[in-house]
Image (cartoon, rainbow, N blue to C red):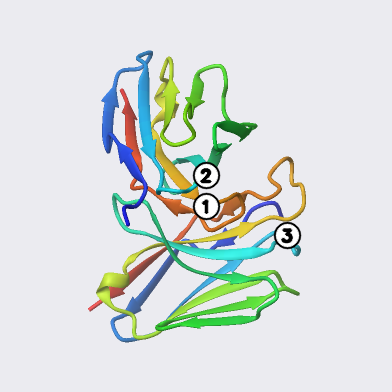
Amino acid sequence: EAGVVQSPRYKIIEKKQPVAFWCNPISGHNTLYWYLQNLGQGPELLIRYENEEAVDDSQLPKDRFSAERLKGVDSTLKIQPAELGDSAVYLCASSYRDKDTQYFGPGTRLTVL
Amino acid sequence: GEDVEQSLFLSVREGDSSVINCTYTDSSSTYLYWYKQEPGAGLQLLTYIFSNMDMKQDQRLTVLLNKKDKHLSLRIADTQTGDSAIYFCAERRARNYGGSQGNLIFGKGTKLSVKP
Protein backbone atom coordinates (compact mmCIF):
# COMPACT_ATOMS: atom_id res chain seq x y z
CA GLU A 1 0.00 0.00 0.00
CA ALA A 2 1.39 3.41 -0.97
CA GLY A 3 2.00 5.84 1.82
CA VAL A 4 1.32 9.56 1.94
CA VAL A 5 2.90 11.24 -1.06
CA GLN A 6 4.16 14.82 -1.03
CA SER A 7 5.76 16.99 -3.64
CA PRO A 8 8.05 18.69 -4.13
CA ARG A 9 10.49 17.28 -1.60
CA TYR A 10 12.57 20.46 -1.62
CA LYS A 11 11.80 24.02 -2.63
CA ILE A 12 13.99 27.11 -2.59
CA ILE A 13 12.39 30.47 -3.27
CA GLU A 14 13.06 34.13 -2.66
CA LYS A 15 11.02 36.01 -0.11
CA LYS A 16 7.75 37.51 -1.31
CA GLN A 17 7.37 34.72 -3.91
CA PRO A 18 4.42 32.32 -3.79
CA VAL A 19 4.86 28.60 -3.18
CA ALA A 20 2.56 25.57 -3.18
CA PHE A 21 2.85 22.11 -1.71
CA TRP A 22 0.86 19.07 -2.77
CA CYS A 23 -0.22 16.03 -0.77
CA ASN A 24 -1.87 12.76 -1.77
CA PRO A 25 -3.08 10.84 1.31
CA ILE A 26 -3.30 7.09 1.78
CA SER A 27 -6.17 5.70 -0.24
CA GLY A 28 -9.39 5.63 1.74
CA HIS A 29 -8.20 8.05 4.43
CA ASN A 30 -10.84 10.70 5.01
CA THR A 31 -8.85 12.92 7.35
CA LEU A 32 -5.90 14.95 6.12
CA TYR A 33 -3.54 17.11 8.15
CA TRP A 34 -0.93 19.73 7.32
CA TYR A 35 1.81 20.27 9.88
CA LEU A 36 4.66 22.74 10.17
CA GLN A 37 7.96 21.48 11.57
CA ASN A 38 10.58 24.05 12.45
CA LEU A 39 14.17 23.01 12.96
CA GLY A 40 14.64 21.26 16.29
CA GLN A 41 10.92 21.18 16.99
CA GLY A 42 8.08 18.71 16.79
CA PRO A 43 5.34 19.08 14.18
CA GLU A 44 2.61 21.63 14.86
CA LEU A 45 -0.82 21.33 13.27
CA LEU A 46 -1.75 23.96 10.69
CA ILE A 47 -5.04 22.59 9.38
CA ARG A 48 -7.15 19.45 9.51
CA TYR A 49 -9.62 18.30 6.86
CA GLU A 50 -12.51 15.89 7.17
CA ASN A 51 -13.16 15.01 3.52
CA GLU A 52 -13.46 18.42 1.82
CA GLU A 53 -14.19 20.39 4.97
CA ALA A 54 -11.51 22.23 6.93
CA VAL A 55 -12.67 21.41 10.46
CA ASP A 56 -9.73 22.94 12.34
CA ASP A 57 -7.74 25.78 10.80
CA SER A 58 -7.25 27.75 13.99
CA GLN A 59 -3.44 27.59 13.70
CA LEU A 60 -3.25 28.52 10.02
CA PRO A 61 -1.93 32.07 9.45
CA LYS A 62 -4.69 33.10 7.13
CA ASP A 63 -3.12 36.34 5.97
CA ARG A 64 -0.61 34.44 3.84
CA PHE A 65 -1.46 30.74 4.06
CA SER A 66 -4.30 28.96 2.31
CA ALA A 67 -5.22 25.34 1.75
CA GLU A 68 -7.74 23.38 -0.21
CA ARG A 69 -8.94 19.82 -0.60
CA LEU A 70 -11.45 20.17 -3.37
CA LYS A 71 -12.48 16.56 -4.03
CA GLY A 72 -11.75 15.22 -0.57
CA VAL A 73 -8.57 13.44 -1.68
CA ASP A 74 -5.49 15.49 -2.68
CA SER A 75 -4.69 18.72 -0.92
CA THR A 76 -2.65 21.81 -1.68
CA LEU A 77 -1.11 24.20 0.84
CA LYS A 78 -0.09 27.62 -0.44
CA ILE A 79 1.94 30.48 0.96
CA GLN A 80 1.71 33.90 -0.67
CA PRO A 81 3.88 35.83 -0.16
CA ALA A 82 6.56 33.74 1.54
CA GLU A 83 8.64 35.24 4.35
CA LEU A 84 12.06 34.26 5.65
CA GLY A 85 10.47 32.79 8.77
CA ASP A 86 8.47 30.33 6.68
CA SER A 87 11.59 28.22 6.08
CA ALA A 88 10.66 24.86 7.60
CA VAL A 89 9.47 21.38 6.72
CA TYR A 90 5.80 21.08 5.78
CA LEU A 91 4.41 17.66 6.61
CA CYS A 92 1.21 16.09 5.41
CA ALA A 93 -0.46 13.25 7.30
CA SER A 94 -3.64 11.25 6.88
CA SER A 95 -5.82 8.96 8.93
CA TYR A 96 -8.83 6.81 8.16
CA ARG A 97 -10.96 8.97 10.41
CA ASP A 98 -10.37 11.76 12.87
CA LYS A 99 -8.70 10.48 16.06
CA ASP A 100 -7.33 7.41 14.26
CA THR A 101 -3.60 6.85 13.93
CA GLN A 102 -1.92 9.38 11.67
CA TYR A 103 0.55 8.41 8.96
CA PHE A 104 3.00 10.99 7.69
CA GLY A 105 4.47 11.79 4.33
CA PRO A 106 8.18 12.60 3.79
CA GLY A 107 7.58 16.35 3.95
CA THR A 108 8.55 19.32 1.81
CA ARG A 109 11.58 21.27 2.97
CA LEU A 110 11.08 24.96 2.15
CA THR A 111 13.95 27.43 2.14
CA VAL A 112 13.11 31.10 1.75
CA LEU A 113 16.06 33.31 0.80
CA GLY B 1 2.86 22.50 32.00
CA GLU B 2 1.52 23.14 28.54
CA ASP B 3 4.30 21.41 26.61
CA VAL B 4 5.16 17.79 26.00
CA GLU B 5 8.66 17.46 27.44
CA GLN B 6 11.48 15.23 26.26
CA SER B 7 15.20 15.26 26.84
CA LEU B 8 16.92 16.43 23.67
CA PHE B 9 19.76 13.91 23.37
CA LEU B 10 20.56 10.31 24.26
CA SER B 11 23.71 8.40 23.38
CA VAL B 12 24.09 4.63 23.79
CA ARG B 13 26.40 1.87 22.61
CA GLU B 14 25.27 -0.69 20.09
CA GLY B 15 23.68 -3.67 21.82
CA ASP B 16 22.67 -1.69 24.92
CA SER B 17 19.11 -0.75 25.79
CA SER B 18 17.87 2.79 25.17
CA VAL B 19 15.22 4.45 27.28
CA ILE B 20 13.60 7.63 26.00
CA ASN B 21 11.39 9.50 28.43
CA CYS B 22 8.49 11.87 27.92
CA THR B 23 6.24 13.90 30.18
CA TYR B 24 2.90 14.82 28.71
CA THR B 25 0.36 17.40 29.74
CA ASP B 26 -3.19 16.07 29.85
CA SER B 27 -4.05 13.30 32.30
CA SER B 28 -7.12 12.61 30.17
CA SER B 29 -5.18 12.09 26.96
CA THR B 30 -6.56 9.01 25.27
CA TYR B 31 -3.63 7.79 23.19
CA LEU B 32 0.11 8.31 23.49
CA TYR B 33 2.36 7.78 20.48
CA TRP B 34 5.99 7.28 19.62
CA TYR B 35 7.19 8.36 16.18
CA LYS B 36 10.66 8.01 14.65
CA GLN B 37 12.16 10.54 12.22
CA GLU B 38 15.29 9.79 10.24
CA PRO B 39 17.22 12.63 8.53
CA GLY B 40 15.29 14.13 5.65
CA ALA B 41 12.30 11.87 6.18
CA GLY B 42 8.80 12.17 7.57
CA LEU B 43 7.60 10.68 10.82
CA GLN B 44 7.28 6.92 11.04
CA LEU B 45 4.81 5.53 13.56
CA LEU B 46 6.62 3.16 15.91
CA THR B 47 3.99 2.28 18.44
CA TYR B 48 1.18 3.70 20.53
CA ILE B 49 -0.53 2.93 23.79
CA PHE B 50 -4.09 3.47 24.93
CA SER B 51 -4.49 5.29 28.19
CA ASN B 52 -6.08 2.34 30.00
CA MET B 53 -2.88 0.31 29.57
CA ASP B 54 0.33 0.65 31.54
CA MET B 55 2.61 -1.37 29.30
CA LYS B 56 2.83 -2.47 25.70
CA GLN B 57 5.52 -4.63 24.14
CA ASP B 58 6.21 -4.96 20.42
CA GLN B 59 9.34 -6.91 19.51
CA ARG B 60 12.30 -4.77 20.68
CA LEU B 61 10.06 -1.93 21.80
CA THR B 62 8.49 -1.59 25.25
CA VAL B 63 6.25 1.32 26.15
CA LEU B 64 5.54 2.14 29.78
CA LEU B 65 2.80 4.54 30.83
CA ASN B 66 2.47 6.12 34.26
CA LYS B 67 -0.78 8.07 34.19
CA LYS B 68 -0.42 9.39 37.72
CA ASP B 69 2.84 11.13 36.81
CA LYS B 70 1.88 11.70 33.15
CA HIS B 71 5.07 9.92 32.17
CA LEU B 72 5.67 7.84 29.08
CA SER B 73 8.80 5.93 28.17
CA LEU B 74 10.07 3.99 25.19
CA ARG B 75 12.62 1.25 25.71
CA ILE B 76 14.52 -0.12 22.73
CA ALA B 77 16.24 -3.40 23.46
CA ASP B 78 19.49 -4.36 21.72
CA THR B 79 19.84 -0.93 20.14
CA GLN B 80 21.33 -0.95 16.64
CA THR B 81 23.03 1.78 14.60
CA GLY B 82 19.93 1.82 12.40
CA ASP B 83 17.95 3.03 15.42
CA SER B 84 19.81 6.35 15.30
CA ALA B 85 17.12 8.96 14.68
CA ILE B 86 14.93 11.52 16.42
CA TYR B 87 12.11 10.05 18.50
CA PHE B 88 8.96 12.07 19.10
CA CYS B 89 6.45 11.53 21.85
CA ALA B 90 2.91 12.73 21.08
CA GLU B 91 -0.31 12.88 23.06
CA ARG B 92 -3.86 13.04 21.83
CA ARG B 93 -5.48 15.50 24.19
CA ALA B 94 -8.99 14.93 25.44
CA ARG B 95 -9.58 18.30 27.06
CA ASN B 96 -9.82 21.60 25.27
CA TYR B 97 -6.38 23.19 25.55
CA GLY B 98 -6.94 26.38 23.63
CA GLY B 99 -8.57 24.56 20.76
CA SER B 100 -6.21 21.58 20.69
CA GLN B 101 -8.80 19.05 21.80
CA GLY B 102 -8.38 15.85 19.87
CA ASN B 103 -5.23 17.05 18.14
CA LEU B 104 -1.82 15.41 18.38
CA ILE B 105 0.64 17.44 20.44
CA PHE B 106 4.29 16.59 19.91
CA GLY B 107 7.37 17.00 22.02
CA LYS B 108 10.54 18.49 20.56
CA GLY B 109 12.06 15.07 19.99
CA THR B 110 14.96 13.12 21.46
CA LYS B 111 17.94 12.57 19.21
CA LEU B 112 19.24 9.04 19.75
CA SER B 113 22.84 8.39 18.74
CA VAL B 114 24.05 4.81 18.68
CA LYS B 115 27.81 4.28 18.82
CA PRO B 116 29.25 1.10 17.31
Q: Residue at x 49, y 41 (%)?
A: A35
Query: Which numbered disc covers residue B26?
Result: 3
Q: Are marks 3 and 1 in contact (CB under 8 Å)?
A: no
Question: In the image, residue B80 lies at what x, y percent?
Answer: 28, 78
Classify residue B93 as left or right of residue B37: right
Query: Which chain is mark 2 on?
Result: A
Query: Which chain is mark 3 on?
Result: B
Instruction: Determine if residue B81 is in view.
Output: yes
- Measured in 3D between alpha carbons, the distance from the residue under mark 2 to the one under mark 1, in whole angstroms, is 5 Å
Q: Are marks 2 and 1 in contact (CB under 8 Å)?
A: yes
Say whether disc 2 or disc 1 marks the residue closer to the N-terminus: 2
**Quick check: B78 above or below A94?**
below
Element at label 1: loop
> Which of B1 and A61 lies nearest the eye of the viewer?
A61
Quadrant for the C terminus of chain A, please.
top left
Question: In the image, residue A25 lies at what x, y percent?
Answer: 41, 44
Query: Which chain is mark 1 on?
Result: A
* Residue lying farthest to the left in this orientation: B116
Instruction: Determine if residue A42 is in view.
Output: no
Element at label 2: loop
- Measured in 3D between alpha carbons, the distance from the residue under mark 3 to the one under mark 1, in whole angstroms, is 24 Å
**Location of residue A99 (image quadrant):** bottom right
**Quick check: A1 above or below A78?**
below
In the rendered image, which residue does mark 2 sit on? A30
Q: Residue at x 33, y 32 (%)?
A: A110
Query: Which numbered disc covers residue A96?
Result: 1
